[in-house]
Image (tube, grey):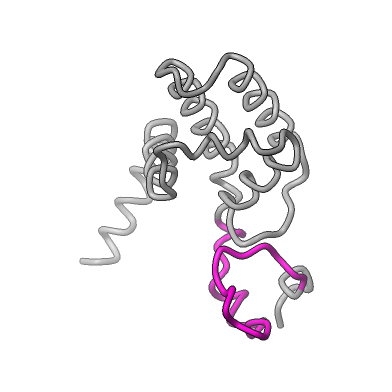
């Protein structure tokens, strides 16, 4: 049986045209949040770095950068809610904290950019663990 928090209404990126809720078991199976928790800090750090890059390019004012950085700090100290994925949580929480300025963080940035940055960040910061997992994966393939 699914944990009860998966049965709560969550913010979704998809499903706008559906009239009913998805099957709870299928939703639990497809949810990545239980794994995404490890990416929480990396996603926030990547967002901070990206905001600084936008400011250096002149796409954010110093005030907007300050708002985003302070907002990301508040998001980082907040309790991790249940939602579709870690990116959605951080985006939604940042908008709750600082308002519409949060949307500027997506200037020229896709979800794939975020995921790629996290993968690189985790690989660079935990090479030993990554190497062990890679060896195990390769061993299982042989």
The residue at 43%/31% (across/down) is 125
Quadrant of the snapshot with the C terminus? bottom left
Question: What number of labels is visible?
Answer: 0
The residue at 74%/42% (across/down) is 96
Indicate yes or no whether the magenta region holds residue 112: no
Q: Which residues are magenta?
A: 8-35
Nearer to me, 2 or 74 = 74
Q: Residue furthest left?
A: 142
Residue 19 point in image, percent of width and height: 65, 85
Figure quadrant of residue 27? bottom right
Residue 18 point in image, percent of width and height: 60, 82
Residue 2 against residue 72 in the figure, above or below? below
Residue 89 against residue 67 in the figure, above or below? below
Quadrant of the snapshot with the N terminus? bottom right
Residue 127 point in image, percent of width and height: 37, 35
The kind of secondary structure the magenta stretch mainly shows is: loop
Figure quadrant of residue 76? top right
Residue 59 against residue 20 in the figure, above or below? above
Nearer to me, 112 or 5 = 112
Nearer to me, 29 or 9 = 9
The residue at 70%/44% (across/down) is 93
Indicate yes or no whether the magenta region holds residue 30: yes
In this image, 78 relative to 92: left or right? right
In this image, 88 relative to 115: left or right? right
The residue at 77%/68% (across/down) is 5
Residue 15 point in image, percent of width and height: 57, 74
């Amino acid at each position: 049986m699914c944990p009860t928090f998966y049965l709560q209404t969550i913010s979704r990126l998809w499903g706008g045209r559906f009239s009913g809720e998805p099957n709870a078991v299928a939703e639990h199976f497809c949810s990545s949040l239980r794994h995404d928790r490890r990416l929480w800090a990396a996603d926030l750090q990547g967002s901070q770095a990206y905001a600084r890059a936008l400011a250096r390019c002149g796409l954010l004012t110093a005030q907007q950068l300050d708002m985003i950085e302070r907002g990301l700090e508040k998001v980082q100290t907040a309790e991790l809610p249940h939602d579709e994925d870690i990116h959605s949580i951080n985006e939604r929480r940042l908008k709750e904290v600082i308002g519409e300025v949060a949307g500027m963080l997506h200037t020229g940035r896709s979800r794939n950019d975020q995921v790629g940055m996290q993968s690189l960040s985790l690989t660079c910061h935990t090479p030993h663990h990554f190497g062990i997992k890679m060896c195990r994966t390769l061993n299982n393939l042989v």
